Each structure stands twice: as structure tokens, then as C-alpha cells.
Image: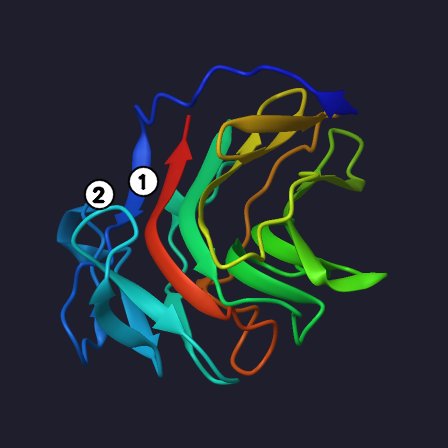
Amino acid sequence: MGVTVVPAAAHADVVAHWHMDEGSDASVMVDSASAGGQNNGTIVNVTTGVAGLVSGKAYSFSGETPYIEVPDHDSLDPGNAPITLTATVRTVNAPMPDDSYDVVRKGYTDTKGGDWKMEIKRNPNNHSIGRLHCSFKGVMPTGKRRTVARVAQVDIVDGRTHTLECRRTATAVHAVVDGRVFTNAKASGNISNREPVIVGAKMKGDDVLQGTLDEVIIDIG
């Protein structure tokens, strides 16, 4: 594992793009990439319509209850294909009150068919430090599940805006913070599950993001 240079994802196959440009008191997070709103999300206790981190508007998360749920859809499962998760985040100042802030995920540790997630993981020895953690668990050809994860060695719980990427290829997982790339060169297998996508939390009341979120993108292929 180490720092390497990986070309930026082309986003040629964007399956979900949530601009988060909805106004205040919005109830639906609109996906601009899918037909018929199949990857729209239900907004729960999230403050919408705040100043955008990239452009337009963004969402603000605080407290214990906000999250967004996007129903399961086959377009959100990579199978064996490459997948890139992208988000722009500005956290509130540390220390982190929970062990992680989940940014976007599909599935859980025990989910049949594997899972993928982007989160900000708290340093166990210093709760004022939080780092991007990318994790992809898939089913290998042997039938066994394998988790391949990488932590980017950059503190991002600093009240500043950061662009985060979690990239899974056929042979590696890359955690990318503002263009700095950290790699774990292992294959992670086939990922396909029946769980919804959760944005801004692990689930209601658990690992809730504390800060502002903008421009979340899922790119497969």
C-alpha cells in the first residue's frame, strides 16, 4: 500500500449524480443521471438549500437524525465493474463525536452480496483527526467475501472543503483526497446487494455526518 498516481475517473458512466441544489425544506434529493427519477432519494431531517460547496446549493447535516435513502436499484450495483464514489464535504470542526461519518454507502458488513462505502473515519488515538476511508467488499470467484479498504492519510475534519473519491478497479482500491491518491492493490470481487443507498449516515441515528455535503456522484464502468 502507498501513495501513487492514478488518472482521474472520466465519469463516462455516471449512474447517479445528486447535485443537492434543492431549496429549503426539500423532501426529495433529485438524481440528474437516471431516467424517471429511479435514483431519487427521500430526505429525512436534512437542512437543504444552504450555500453550495461547488456551486448552487448543498445539504447540511447536524445532530443524530438526518439521512437520505435512495431505493435499491440494479444500476447502483457495480458487480465486477469499476466504481467511483465522489463527494464534496466540509465538516464541522473536530473532535468527531462518533467513530465515523458515513458519506455514502450501499450495504453493511453482513450484507449478502457485499457492500461499498465512503466514510470519514476517526483516528482512535486523536478524535480531532478524521480521514477518508474507502471500503469495498465483494464475492470472489471462490465464493468467499473479501473486504478491500484504504484510508487516505490526510486529516479532513478541519472545517475546510475537500473533494473525496473512493475508486474501485479490477485490481485495487484508491482513496483520493483533493487529488492525493492512496492505494491498496487488491481485488475486491463482485458487489451486488438489495440494500438502499444511504447518504450522510450509516442509518438513522448512526454515524451521521456533521457538516455540509455537495455533488455526490456514483460512476460505474
Give the quarter of the figure containing the C terminus. top left
- Residue 141 visible somewhere in the drawing: yes
Front position in the image: 213 or 106: 213
Residue drawn at 47 percent across, 43 percent down: 77
How many numbered tags mark residues here? 2
Front position in the image: 213 or 17: 213
Question: Which label number is shown at residue 33?
Answer: 2
- Circle 1 sits on which residue? 15
Label 1 near label 2: C-beta < 8 Å? yes
Residue 116 image offset from top left, x and y in percent: 58, 48
**SS type, badge 1:** strand
Q: Disc 2 versus disc 1: distance between alpha carbons? A: 6 Å
Q: Quadrant of residue 110?
A: bottom right
- Residue 80 visible somewhere in the drawing: no
Residue drawn at 39 percent across, 41 percent down: 218
Residue drawn at 65 percent across, 41 percent down: 154
**SS type, badge 2:** loop
Q: Residues within 10 Å of mark 2 (few under 14, many from 20)?
A: some
Mark 2: which amino acid? Ala
Q: Residues within 10 Å of mark 1 (few under 14, many from 20)?
A: many
Mark 1: which amino acid? Val
Q: Quadrant of residue 101?
A: bottom right
Please state if 146 lies on the left or on the right of 44 as rendered: right
